[in-house]
Amino acid sequence: MKKEFLDNISMGMFLMSQQQHLTVKNLQQTEAIILAGGLGTRLRSAVPDLPKCMAPVAGRPFLYYVINHLRMQGISRLIFSLGYMHEAILNWLQAEYPTLDYECVIEDEPLGTGGAIQFALQKTKTENIFIVNGDTLFRFDAAKMLQQHLTSNAACTLALKPMLHFDRYGVVALAGDNTITHFKEKQYYAQGLINAGVYLINKESFLQKLFPTKFSFEKDYLERFITDKKFSGVEQDAYFIDIGIPEDYNRAQQEFARPLLNLSDIHDDWTLFLDRDGVINEDKPGDYITTPDEFVFTKGAPALFKKLSDKFKRIIVVTNQRGVGRGIIQHEDLITMNEKMLQSVKQVGGNIERIYYCTDIDDLAFYRKPNPGMAFQAIRDFPDIQPEKCIIVGNSLSDMKFGRYAGMYTVFVTTTNKNVTLPHSDIDLLFESLKAFVDQI
């Protein structure tokens, strides 16, 4: 196989640098606990009949945005610490995230933030665990946080947000080596670093402290043991919102609202993600495309890729290939099919930047759609990709979920499923084929 085409074909982590590989590997060995058991008394006037994290924001529960950010950071397994009205969260998780790898713990009575973390740790499997709140979103960089945590051998690493002119939060002070030296009480500050409510803890170090069943993580752990000089802080000037009070909850409605997808607004800084079978080539519903001879382009392709390549900055193919994992398709045949696609597209003046494929047979596999692993990988490989300037075109609702989880716009083509119609919560636009989509851009 020619190297120029092989370099466009990737699965999982094949084409990463050594440093990227180590970072992503470590992230895949990390989990996150989401604290979602609060009573939400301050928000009761705005959302009287739901847990605080389930408050609707721009048509989705706030918890939806928290989960998706964690997964797009490469954190694939989640533990939910639940309490008040936990049934609503459990039912929603089962309906919205059937392929999410998660577990839940349910408090019989409030345990405090520390007690809730300690209780949830019994479900964790890894050495280092992220902790976030279900009613707060901080778009932290998990790789940067993990790298500092491991390098400094910290017991706990905090994500810190720089702020100006505030009195709602206390301030965290750092030494030159990013060790946290002390926590300052709430008062007015002209500027400072606040605790953004995101932690990365070493489980063994934390559990060695032998805490009671109920305790405060902030008071009884962070403030009490700060003299150990084992707490690290990572400053990140990223988006932050806490919906715990009505005015910020109302602000979130505007900030999380997505503009409608207008194809005329697409410019050359957008990325197009394409499913393969049923979009680029003819599909065999209920069966697999098993050999290169069975790979037949859909109507108008590959010539469509010239216009697509002129319109989009890059084109990326993301395809589940469970048939390889089941032994029905030979891996060599899959590579040959992908090479055939790349060559044909190149001959008409188009370009496919990269092909990602997942051969895993487990629905919970992070890189298998609808899970967002292939989108996560693409963004790691091409850091200039902005999810809000991405479109996924697919012929299954799994493709649409993949796009939504990754923060993309979604376009459904009805090549193999004529029964899907609009409006649909996971679909922005609908066309009968890839050609019909291309004709409109």
Image (spheres, rainbow, N blue to C red):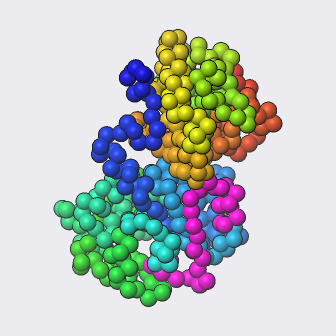
140 relative position to 362: left or right? left
Q: Residue 287: x percent and y percent?
A: 70, 35
Residue located 53% across and 15% down the image:
344
66 relative position to 180: left or right? right
> Quick one: 364 or 423, which is closer to the camera?
364
Question: Please, which residue is most extreme toward the top here?
Answer: 348
Q: Residue 4: x percent and y percent?
A: 39, 21
350 relative position to 55: left or right? left
Residue located 56% across and 59% down the image:
101
Circle count: 0
Residue located 61% across and 68% down the image:
52
Q: Is residue 112 magenta?
A: yes
Q: Residue 204: x percent and y percent?
A: 35, 75
The answer to whether 217 is drawn above or below residue 198 in the figure is below
Residue 122: in sight, yes or no? yes
The answer to whether 124 is drawn above or below residue 56 in the figure is below
The answer to whether 260 is drawn above or below residue 156 in the figure is above
> Which quarter of the rendering shows the N terminus?
top left
Question: Please, which residue is most extreme toward the bottom here?
Answer: 212
Q: In which quarter of the view is residue 145 placed?
A: bottom left
Q: Residue 312: x percent and y percent?
A: 51, 24
Residue 57: in sight, yes or no? no
Residue located 38% across and 72% down the image:
203
> Quick one: 205 or 159, which is closer to the camera?
205
Stretch of the chain drawn in magenta: 89-116
31 relative position to 146: left or right? right
